Image (tube, rainbow, N blue to C red):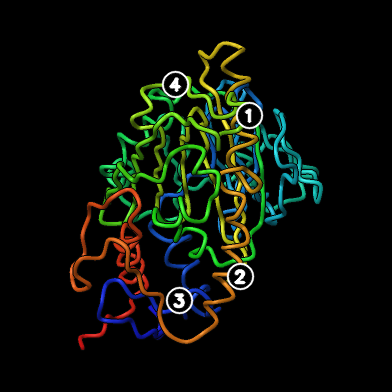
Amino acid sequence: MTDLKLPWPKNYNEVPKEAFVRKDIYAEEVKRIFHGTEWHPVAHESELPTPGDFKTFRLAGVPLLIGRDVEGVVRVFYNACSHRGNQLETAVMGNKTEFECPYHRWLFDSKGDLVGCPNPREFLPGFNKADYPLAQPRFDIFFGLIFVTLSAQTESLLEYLGDSQNCLRELLAGDGRLKLLGYQKVRYDTNWKSYTDNDGYHAPLLHQAFKMLNWQGGQGRQYTATMRGHICFESALSVATGPSVLKDKSLIEFKGQDPAVGSRIVSLFPTFVSTKHLDVINLRFATPIDAETVEVHYAYFAHQDDDEDMVRHRLRQSSNLLGPCGLISMEDASIFHRIHIGNHTPGSAIFQKGVHDPLKLESEFLQNDESGNLPRWEYYRSIMGFERATA
């Protein structure tokens, strides 16, 4: 444990701004959260559709190599040679049946087994290639979504997901049989908590495109799915009409299920967000770079059973609605950065919308409340060991 201290207000709706900006706090977050007892989504199986496909990802600095072996089995390795720890693969994604370390030419197959190394007769007596496979973290899969934890003490994935399972499954098209459309990747100049502190209150106020989607009504709901503060949103949506709608209405055409729940979001602690707006299926794999930077990979998907017209429709909506320059979310980058600047001032961020009693933590919220973030903050406070004031 550590002697790290941060005075935490008595009221549940107050969060000290120091939590966003102190570098010593960030270093402890990496140990306790990102390298601790949490599950982190790092990929979807559909990003690896054929044997030999792989992608790389860094989880708060830890390099991962995620691939499908020659027999079609999904595997996750640490992206480091088992010899001297050299980074094995530098490509973002690709297809290989073997991975060769350029430092000393150790060669690994797609199952992670060491299959060749120069001059083994001159190694330590008793050297055996079978003793040097690529190391693997714990991982599990939920409807194609690949999770990694760096702790042996983390509970099972289904326990971790709790009541978020049903909503997450719906976001993954009900069966997880997705097809990758593409990515948008961005680094935001903000602390990872500023990025994930996104709430339901701001959406119709900040994002002008929400007016075109008639999402201001707030007839949906959000709820806390586990004690870890995972949040699920089910947002009501009316089909957009009137003079303020885009001239080309196909961009916001709804071809999927009943638009009564036109938007779903599952936000899993600490940084993962999955979103279905209209017909967009979007998984956001995020990782902190440092105390002032977070990297987000917006991945977009279709369903494997979609016809060509539906694939084009999803692709068009994906590239225009969400992501760092999407109509719905283009203002986010500026706000994330301005929040980070503002948090270098004294005091606390004080939540208001949807707070009924500052001394009580609730679990059900309206669509446009900001109080839905408070259970997540309480879990963060507890796992970091910060003591709440009693007066």
Mark 4–mark 2 CB contact (< 8 Å) = no
Cα separation between marks 4 and 3: 41 Å
| Vertical side of 376 occupied by 330: above or below | above
User: Quadrant location of residue 131?
Assistant: top right
Q: Which mark is residue 19?
A: 3
Q: Quadrant of residue 379?
A: bottom left
The residue at which mark 2 appears reads as 292
Foreground: disc 4 or disc 2 = 4
| Camera-nearest label, 3 or 1 | 1
Give the mark, 2 or 1, whose residue is nearer the N terminus.
1
Q: Secondary structure at mark 1?
A: loop
Q: Amino acid at mark 4?
A: Gly
Q: What residue does disc 4 label? A: 256
Amino acid type at circle 2 is Glu
C-alpha distance separating marks 4 and 2: 38 Å
Q: Please identify the quadrant where the N terminus is shown.
A: bottom left
Left or right: 146 in relation to 266: right
Element type where label 4 sits in the image:
loop
**Residue 330 on image: x %, y %:** 62, 50
The kind of secondary structure element at disc 3 is helix
Q: Position of residue 143 (x, y in %)?
A: 41, 29
Nearer-the-camera pick, 243 or 34:
243
Q: Position of residue 158 (x, y in %)?
A: 30, 40
Tell me the distance, in whole angstroms, between the alpha carbons under discs 4 and 1.
21 Å
* Residue neighbourhood size for the residue with mark 2, other residues' Cα within 10 Å, grouped as few (<14), some (14–19), many (≥20): many
Q: Which mark is residue 247?
A: 1
